[in-house]
């Protein structure tokens, strides 16, 4: 049986982080711990962030690896770190949802578009940030799996 792209195992609720690097590392570690990527992918996520911010607006950042990180991806997966107090992603951009993604082959584009649709609605993001359970949070992303 193939593993779902997003599950309760790849979600952290009410995280507290000091900075965007910590948030990205946390999102990346969830992907590593659940067998989606190799450890090296986390550094590629940080490299990608250094090139250009992965903050997309509406209090959402979607860190992912650089183009050459594809070899570190074992399977497509998503991690979600809910940070109700927010973390500064630079330029007065505060992320309350940090969604780590890893796409096998070109699946990341499909995953990204599904996440973008959900997160384009400010009221959806607010409800996700205020989710009290992993099940509640997951319900917003049913289309991703």
Image: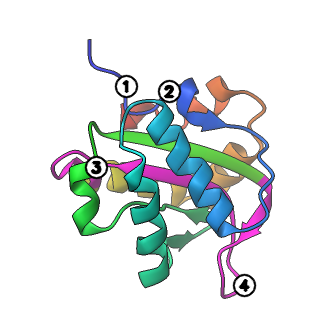
Label 2, on which residue? Answer: 7
The dot on residue 72 is 3
Residues under numbered marks 2 and 1 in contact, where contact means CB atoms less than 8 Å apart? yes
> Which residue is found at the position 45% from the left and 32% from the top?
6
CA distance for labels 2 and 3: 21 Å
Q: Please report whichever mark, 4 or 2, sits nearer to the chain's N-terminal start.
A: 2
Pick out the residue farthest to the bottom.
Answer: 91
Crowding around mark 2 (Cα neighbors within 10 Å: few <14, some 14 to 19, many 20+) is some
Does dot 2 land on a helix, a strand or a loop? Answer: loop
Does dot 1 land on a helix, a strand or a loop? Answer: loop
Residues under numbered marks 4 and 1 in contact, where contact means CB atoms less than 8 Å apart? no
Label 4, on which residue? Answer: 92
Whether residue 13 is in magenta: the answer is no
Crowding around mark 3 (Cα neighbors within 10 Å: few <14, some 14 to 19, many 20+) is some
Give the answer, above or below, for where 124 lies relative to 137. below
Q: Please report whichever mark, 3 or 4, sits nearer to the chain's N-terminal start.
A: 3
Task: Quarter of the image for the N terminus: give it.
Answer: top left
Q: Give, as a single range, the part of the protein colored magenta.
A: 84-108
> Which residue is found at the position 74% from the left and 66% from the top?
87
The dot on residue 4 is 1
Does dot 4 land on a helix, a strand or a loop? Answer: loop
Q: Please report whichever mark, 2 or 3, sits nearer to the chain's N-terminal start.
A: 2
Closer to the observer: label 2 or label 3? 3
Q: In the image shown, does 33 or 116 lie closer to the viewer?
A: 33
């Amino acid at each position: 049986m193939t593993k779902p792209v997003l599950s309760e195992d790849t979600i952290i609720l009410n995280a507290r982080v000091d900075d965007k690097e910590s948030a990205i590392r946390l999102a990346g570690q969830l992907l590593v711990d659940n067998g989606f990527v190799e450890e090296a992918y986390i550094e590629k996520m940080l490299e990608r962030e250094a090139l250009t911010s992965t903050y997309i607006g509406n209090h959402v950042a979607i860190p992912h690896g650089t183009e050459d990180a594809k070899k570190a991806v074992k399977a497509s997966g998503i991690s979600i770190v809910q940070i109700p107090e927010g973390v500064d992603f630079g330029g007065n951009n505060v992320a309350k949802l940090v969604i780590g993604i890893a796409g096998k082959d070109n699946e990341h584009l499909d995953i990204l578009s599904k996440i973008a649709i959900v997160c384009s609605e400010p009221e959806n993001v607010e409800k996700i940030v205020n989710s009290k359970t992993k099940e509640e949070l997951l319900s917003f992303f049913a289309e991703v799996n």
